[in-house]
């Protein structure tokens, strides 16, 4: 049967409709196979909607974490720029301590200086923006700097340490958020798989959400999209005139007052998804 022959509601409306049908059949002590079919259909829809709620909650969590991460990455970049400025200040203090003796020294000429001076100069010249490498370098500098010979440089590196240590908490937060996002994203695949059953996919196919109920052909990324409350009248226009040679994608006509999920309790509603709207002829 062509799914585009169906009159469709939203899946939450279908769940509501089924609840009414099941309650009616149970109140009349109807023990036919229809009741079991309706209950099975209801259970599958309920499972799908619960999975969809979990999916939306995970998406919301990922979105919030990514927004936080984006702000932290901006702060991290700002720190990287600040680190360069701190290092420039450190070099300036070194020149003060050495009376500008090495101010105009070229990088390639550092190797001709004494071992202690050349080691300090190499460390000062090599700018680091990465936090972990920066900490390692500055610790090496503190070991090399004699606070009596280079008081301005030494005191500056000590005072700057407090500013640099602030980056540690930012990096920890970034690590935690990135890890949380990976964990949440892995949950999405598990939620997808939880509804990739033939019974549920047939319902989603009926409601135009997926284009197939073959598990191997279903696009998982579309499995939790919302279907619209449309009525598709095959081969008919809005004024109820037949259309010649219509394609599979017939014209969708929106009816705002479908009165869904109301049912005519004098007749059973076909389990395949038809007869959503009360038929006035059957009421007479």
Image (cartoon, rainbow, N blue to C red):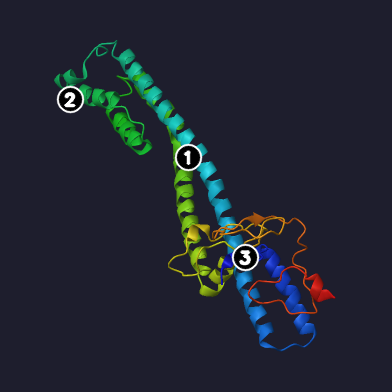
Q: CA distance from mark 2 to mark 3?
A: 71 Å
* Residue located at (71% from left, 73% from top): 18
Q: Residues within 10 Å of mark 2 (few under 14, many from 20)?
A: few
* Residue located at (38% from left, 25% from top): 84
Out of 147 and 153, give the one closest to the viewer.
153
Which residue is label 3 attached to? Answer: 49
What's the mark number on residue 243?
none
Left or right for 116, reference 39: left
Q: Kindly indicate the quadrant of the structure image that contains residue 232.
A: bottom right
Q: Nearer the viewer, mark 2 or mark 3?
A: 3
Percent of width and height locating residue 4: 59, 64
Task: Pick out the residue farthest to the right.
Answer: 284
Lower position in the chain sequence, tag 2 or tag 3:
3
Left or right for 102, reference 89: left
Lower position in the chain sequence, tag 3 or tag 1:
3
Which residue is label 1 attached to? Answer: 170
Label 2 SS: helix
Left or right for 44, reference 146: right
Q: Nearer the viewer, mark 3 or mark 1?
A: 3
Percent of width and height locating residue 89: 38, 19
Q: CA distance from mark 3 to mark 1?
A: 38 Å
Percent of width and height locating residue 160: 42, 27
Which residue is label 2 attached to? Answer: 115
Lower position in the chain sequence, tag 1 or tag 2:
2
């Amino acid at each position: 049967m062509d799914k585009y022959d169906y009159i469709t509601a939203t899946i939450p409306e279908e769940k509501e409709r089924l609840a009414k049908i099941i309650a009616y059949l149970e109140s009349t002590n109807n023990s036919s196979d229809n009741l079991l079919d309706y209950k099975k259909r209801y259970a599958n829809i309920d499972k799908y909607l619960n999975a969809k709620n979990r999916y939306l909650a995970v998406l919301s969590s990922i979105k919030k974490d990514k927004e936080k991460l984006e702000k932290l990455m901006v702060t991290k970049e700002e720190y990287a720029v600040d680190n360069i400025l701190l290092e420039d200040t450190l070099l300036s203090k070194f020149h003060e301590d050495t009376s500008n003796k090495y101010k105009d020294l070229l990088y390639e000429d550092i190797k001709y200086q004494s071992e202690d001076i050349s080691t300090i100069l190499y460390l000062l010249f090599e700018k680091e923006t990465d936090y972990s490498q920066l900490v390692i370098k500055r610790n090496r500098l503190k070991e090399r700097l004699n606070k009596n010979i280079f008081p301005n440089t030494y005191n500056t590196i000590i005072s700057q340490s407090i500013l640099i240590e602030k980056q540690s908490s930012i990096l920890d937060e970034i690590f935690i958020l990135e890890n949380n996002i990976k964990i949440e994203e892995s949950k999405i695949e598990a939620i997808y798989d939880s509804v990739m059953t033939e019974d549920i996919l047939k319902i989603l196919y009926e409601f135009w959400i997926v284009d197939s109920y073959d598990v191997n052909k279903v696009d998982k990324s579309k499995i939790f999209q919302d279907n619209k409350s449309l009525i598709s009248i095959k081969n008919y226009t809005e004024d109820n005139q037949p259309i010649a040679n219509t394609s599979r994608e017939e014209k969708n006509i929106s009816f705002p007052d479908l009165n869904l999920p109301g049912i005519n309790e004098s007749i059973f509603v076909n389990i395949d998804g038809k007869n959503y709207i009360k038929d006035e002829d059957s009421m007479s």
